[in-house]
Amino acid sequence: MVELRTITKENIDEVLKLRVAKHQETFVSTTAESLAQAYVYKKTAFPFAIYAGEILVGFIMLGYYEVKNQYTLWKLLIDERYQNKGYGRCTLKSAINYLVDRFNAREVYVGVAFGNDIARDLYYSMGFRETGEKDKVQFEMKLEISRE
């Protein structure tokens, strides 16, 4: 249903225009901020445009956090025009598969902003569980991937 595609000179302008709803702006960085981080952490950040067919519906950035030896879902943004259509769930499945296939990841971590109940519920439904780690703005969740 969705495809993770490389961000290129052909789609960068469209990616930069992606926006969440106003009340969600404190939950996730803009794509411009995320791409700046990806540039600085280019060896361990993996940004992608999310497409449903030929329609750009969002942005995701995966990463490897060297200090903790963890693979992460660093950023996830579904444009407000395409929310509540199942793209977030499909994107998470694709992202987890990417980390497993490319890096043999056995755990995936994500930080969830306090108050972002929709994201929290989505992650719970995908098997993520809270780790007990938190800071002033977010709490951590982890998905353990079985070795089948």
Image (spheres, helix red, strand yellow):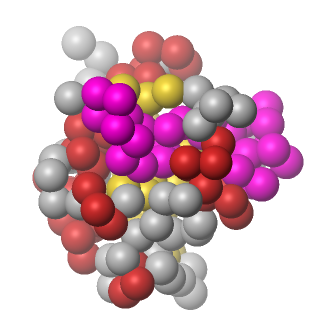
Q: Position of residue 97 (x, y in %)?
A: 36, 23
Whether residue 70 is visible to the viewer of this picture, yes or no, is: no
- Viewer-side residue, 123 vs 51: 51
Decide which of 128, 83 is in the foreground and name it: 83
Across and down, in percent, residue 115 comes to 33, 85
Residue situated in front as seen by the camera: 61 or 20: 20
Query: Can you say which quadrant of the picture contains the C terminus?
Result: top left
Residue located at (41% from left, 49% from top): 58
- In screen coordinates, is 42 left or right of 47? right
Is 144 left, or right, of 31 in this rendering?
left
Q: Is residue 89 above or below residue 107?
A: below
Where residue 83 sits in the image (x, y, percent)? 24, 60
> Could you tell me which residue is drawn at 44 percent across and 29 percent down?
4
Location of residue 37 in the rendering, given as x and y in whole percent from the top left corner: 75, 54
> In which quadrant of the rendered view does residue 94 lie?
top left
Identified at 77% across, 54% down, the residue is 36
Q: Which of the two residues, 140 or 89, is positioned nearer the viewer here?
A: 89
Instruction: Residue 55: say if magenta.
Output: yes
Total residue callouts: 0
Residue 19 belongs to magenta span: no
Mark yes or no: residue 26 visible.
yes
Looking at the image, which residue sits at the far right?
40
Residue 121, relative to residue 67: is it above or below? below
Judge from the rendering whether residue 145 lies leftward or rightward of residue 100; answer left or right: left
Q: Quadrant of the N terminus?
A: top left
Q: What's the residue at 71%, 33% (across, down)?
A: 9
Magenta region: which residues?
35-60
